[in-house]
Amino acid sequence: MMSENDAELVRLSGAALGFEAGEPLWKDLDLTVRPGEFVAVLGANGSGKTTLLRCLLGLQPLSAGTISVLGRSPQAARRDVGYVPQQRRFDPLTPVRARDLVGFGLDGHEWGPPIFNRRQRRERIDAALAEVGATRFADAPASRLSGGQQQLLRIAQALVCDPRLLLCDEPLLSLDLNHQREVSAVVDRRRRDHGTGVVFVTHEINPVLPYVDRVLYLAGQRFTIGPVDEVMTSETLTRLYSSPVDVLRVRDQLVVVGIPDRPVHDPEPAAQP
Ligand SMILES: Nc1ncnc2c1ncn2[C@@H]1O[C@H](COP(=O)(O)OP(=O)(O)OP(=O)(O)O)[C@@H](O)[C@H]1O
Ligand SMILES: [Mg+2]
């Protein structure tokens, strides 16, 4: 039987996050993510995108408000959540094959006996490799693969546990346009075929523009959330930043001009004597 909570993979209510010193990164945040929904998270460096994902993973408590993931606490939901952390390249000295790397995604849920026997494990890894189009380099040393290929493996690693919610932290960084499209399309296919909810942190909206249902845009303690057509407009971003921002459509791409270095409405607090 479907409970009410099954309809929501994520529910944040009145959520705020701050560290001891200073203003919160964001506050009064209400966010829901439903099965199959693709939510992009945009915002400048330091606006709290990674920290938001860490809250959803149960690694970072909120300073106010409530959070539930799959109707549970984030910690209790962890084994059903796939995570692609903000990227680093693989250490060239680590002798891991591509398929071993994907297999690590099955080892993250360490308590209790292994869930899968060797054959099941292999089948799952093969399926995840195939899903991202990495079968042809499955046995290659991961550190020799290109940045784009490594990124596909990291997505496979997050998908191999068959998550109901997928959190991706800038998976497009340093990829060329073709690889950006490839990675975005893999994630889109997963949420369409499996109803996986997606929270996708990105600096580049264009590669995911065809897929995004809603955008959460963070800017200096403020945020706005809504469909792309509502959020990615000159009016909305100008209001968000309290400073003139222009959003232009060039063919099927969005070009954003005038984002200030620091949001204007966010003056530094006076130094304490
Ligand atoms: N545990 C912590 N204690 C204190 N400050 C923290 C902690 N974690 C993050 N911060 C601060 O919170 C701010 C937001 O960090 P976060 O990593 O979420 O930004 P981001 O939006 O992901 O930025 P980027 O685009 O650079 O990845 C930063 O100023 C960071 O230093
Ligand atoms: Mg980050």
Image (tube, rainbow, N blue to C red):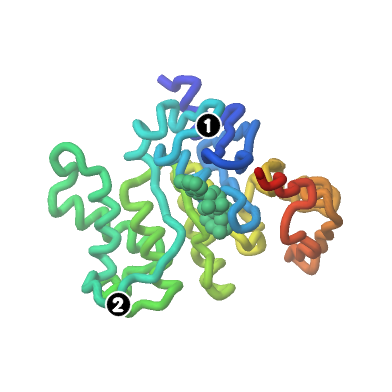
Secondary element under disc 2, as helix, strand or loop, is: loop
In the image, what residue type sits under mark 1?
Ser
Horizontal relation, residue 206 to residue 33: left or right: right
Which of 204 and 267 lies nearest the eye of the viewer? 267
Which x, y percent locates residue 28?
65, 31
Using a 10 Å C-alpha cutoff, classify the residue at mark 2 as few (fewer than 14 neighbours), some (14 to 19) or many (20 or more). few
Task: Answer with the quarter of the image where residue 207 lies.
Answer: bottom right
Which x, y percent locates residue 31?
60, 34
Label 2 – label 1 distance at C-alpha: 39 Å
Mark 1, residue position: 63
Q: Quick check: 108 above or below 140? A: above
Horizontal relation, residue 123 to residue 149: left or right: left
In the image, what residue type sits under mark 2?
Pro
The residue drawn where x is 54% and y is 35% is 34
Which x, y percent locates residue 245?
82, 58
Outermost residue on the front side: it is: 273
Q: Nearer the viewer, mark 2 or mark 1?
A: 1
The residue drawn where x is 15% and y is 54% is 119
- Say whether residue 59 is visible: yes
Secondary element under disc 1, as helix, strand or loop, is: loop
Q: Which mark is residue 90?
A: none
Which of 76 and 123 lies nearest the eye of the viewer? 76
The residue drawn where x is 53% and y is 65% is 172
